[in-house]
């Protein structure tokens, strides 16, 4: 057995952290950043997200038709984008399509903007149609742990306008559950609080194993968990008030 000690600071790390207008970002959340492709050494994602993206693109031949527009950003870069958009597009457009610095998913290294390959690509609102190779990516995304982060009709929940180009890595099986249930990350985070550790939300994964997902509320003192040594579980903070434990059985 493995003894895992969780401190309050650990809620700010992991693929399921919620970053939005209400939940700012701890800069330490962006760990182990690597290039998404050899041709774009400047475009960085956290290692699990970059590796999942590579597998997805290999499956659909995506790099022939899809351009990588934006990945990890420092707070300084996000501030520059915010300021430039305010000057060029005004406050209404900027609030709809650009996250406030310190509250941007791009600062996590788990989010990315994609666009259809063409000579000119809009950096803020790239074209990513619901047809062709872009739609192939969208339909395969959940299998590799990605969600469309800002879907149409959920603007009042996410605080961001519909962005068909913005995808977020949350990992398996969470992306598939969110897609099946038509949930945003905000809704999913709230939903999991109904399943405290010890009871759990159970479903059958694609490989036939049972998956148990449960929520642990953070406490002032460290939380100690006894977990198997094998690679049969994952843990993530939610960037709000606790942790999400995923167990494969």
Image (cartoon, grey):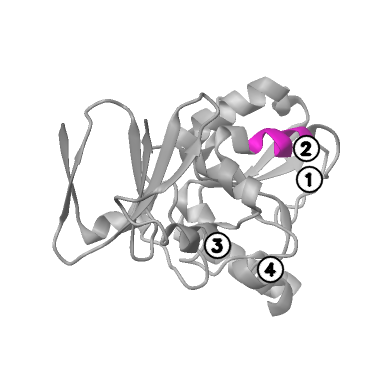
Marked residue nearer the N-terminal end (2 or 3): 2
Q: Which residue is mark 2?
A: 134
Return the mark for residue 128: 1
Q: For the stretch drawn in magenta, what is the main secondary structure?
A: helix
Q: Which residues are magenta?
A: 136-141
Marked residue nearer the N-terminal end (1 or 2): 1
Mark 1 vs mark 2, CA separation in Å: 6 Å
Q: Which residue is mark 4?
A: 155
Q: Is residue 53 above or below residue 78?
A: above
Marked residue nearer the N-terminal end (3 or 1): 1
Q: Position of residue 36 (x, y in %)?
A: 54, 32
Mark 3 vs mark 4, CA separation in Å: 12 Å
Q: Is residue 42 above or below residue 109?
A: above
Q: Which residue is mark 3?
A: 187
Label 4 environment density (alpha carbons within 10 Å; few <14, some 14–19, many ≥20): some
Q: Quadrant of residue 115?
A: top right
Point out the image quarter for the C terminus: top left
Element marked by disc 3:
helix
Q: Count how many numbered circles sit on residues in the image.
A: 4
| Marks 1 and 2 in Cβ contact (< 8 Å) | yes
């Amino acid at each position: 057995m493995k003894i895992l000690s969780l401190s309050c600071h650990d809620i700010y790390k992991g693929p399921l952290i919620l970053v939005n207008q209400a939940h700012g970002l701890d800069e330490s959340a962006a760990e182990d950043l690597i290039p998404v492709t050899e041709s774009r050494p400047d475009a960085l994602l956290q290692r699990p997200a970059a590796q999942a993206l590579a597998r997805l693109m290999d499956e659909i031949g995506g790099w022939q038709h899809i351009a990588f527009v934006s990945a990890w950003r420092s707070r300084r870069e996000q501030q520059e984008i915010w300021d430039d958009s305010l000057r060029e597009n005004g406050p209404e457009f900027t609030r709809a399509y650009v996250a406030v610095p310190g509250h941007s998913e791009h600062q996590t290294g788990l989010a990315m903007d994609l666009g259809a390959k063409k000579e000119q690509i809009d950096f803020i609102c790239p074209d990513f149609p619901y047809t062709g190779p872009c739609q192939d990516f969208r339909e395969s995304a959940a299998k590799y742990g990605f969600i469309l982060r800002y879907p149409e009709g959920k603007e009042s929940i996410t605080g961001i306008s519909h962005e068909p180009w913005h995808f977020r890595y949350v990992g398996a099986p969470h992306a598939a559950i969110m897609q099946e249930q038509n949930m945003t990350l905000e809704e999913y985070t709230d939903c999991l609080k109904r399943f405290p550790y010890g009871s759990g939300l159970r479903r059958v994964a694609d490989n036939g194993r049972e998956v148990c997902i449960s929520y642990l509320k953070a406490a002032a003192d460290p939380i100690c968990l006894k977990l198997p040594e094998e690679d049969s579980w994952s843990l993530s903070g939610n960037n709000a008030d606790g942790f999400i434990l995923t167990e494969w059985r």
